Amino acid sequence: MVIDGLYYALGCAAGGLVVAWLAGPVYGIPLFVAALFCLYFFRDPERQIPSGAVAVSPADGKVVALEAESPSVARVSIFMNLFDVHVNRSPIAGRIAEVRYQRGRFLAANRQQASEQNEQNMVIVEGEATRVAFKQIAGIIARRIVFYKKPGDAVRAGERVGLIKFGSRVDVLLGAEWDIQVRPGNRVLAGSSILARRRSA
């Protein structure tokens, strides 16, 4: 579990106890339910990371778009609903080349405009003869982007690198050297689902 979940759960549970003591047990139930949901939401299961020249999904969720970002770059957009695991992982092994935070709007994360207009964190990972970028994008409810790494840090494929709290979206930008393996409508799991394979491999 992500430690944040324990803090949220303890806060809700403490509030529930206070409300139950002041107003009666039944009135504390919503806060106790919220505490249980926080424990569920911030779960962080182990994943089997595939080997080989692949790019894995950085997020759990549903592929909502597969489009050309430019003539040589494809964008895979993954929407995370409130019930998905929200821990983000590195799509490839390498080094963090750049982390760029952008303030913005809080449109629904499944809308096309969210990729450019919403508050987001752009991360570029430099691997062996490739660069893969991904964006942690905030949504209507998700207004807290967390990223644990800094430029220069080494990462393994599928390594935990951050999370987005309470529903959001992650866009992955892959160059022409990658053969995309997913299509819109596919469900993917962070760290274990293969988004693309290296053409040179």
Image (spheres, helix red, strand yellow):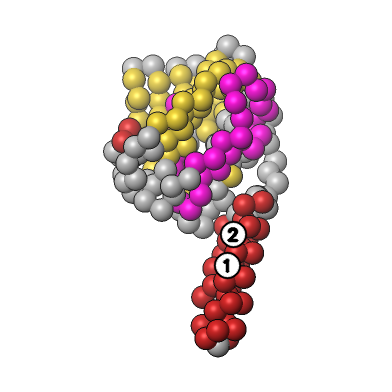
Q: Is residue 167 magenta?
A: yes
Position of residue 145 in the picture relative to residue 11 (left or right) = left
Q: Residue at x 41, y 53 (%)?
A: 141
Q: Give the number of the disc on residue 128.
A: none
Circle 1: residue type: Cys
How many labels sit on residues? 2
Residue 24 in view, yes or no: yes
Residue 54 in view, yes or no: no
Residue 175 position, x and y percent, is 46, 19
| Residue beneath disc 2 | 8
**Hey, which residue is sitting farthest left in the picture?**
113
Q: Is residue 53 magenta?
A: no
Circle 2: residue type: Tyr
Q: Which residues are magenta?
A: 145-173
> Which secondary structure lies at badge 1?
helix
| Residue beneath disc 1 | 12
Q: In front: 64, or 163?
A: 163
> Which secondary structure lies at badge 2?
helix
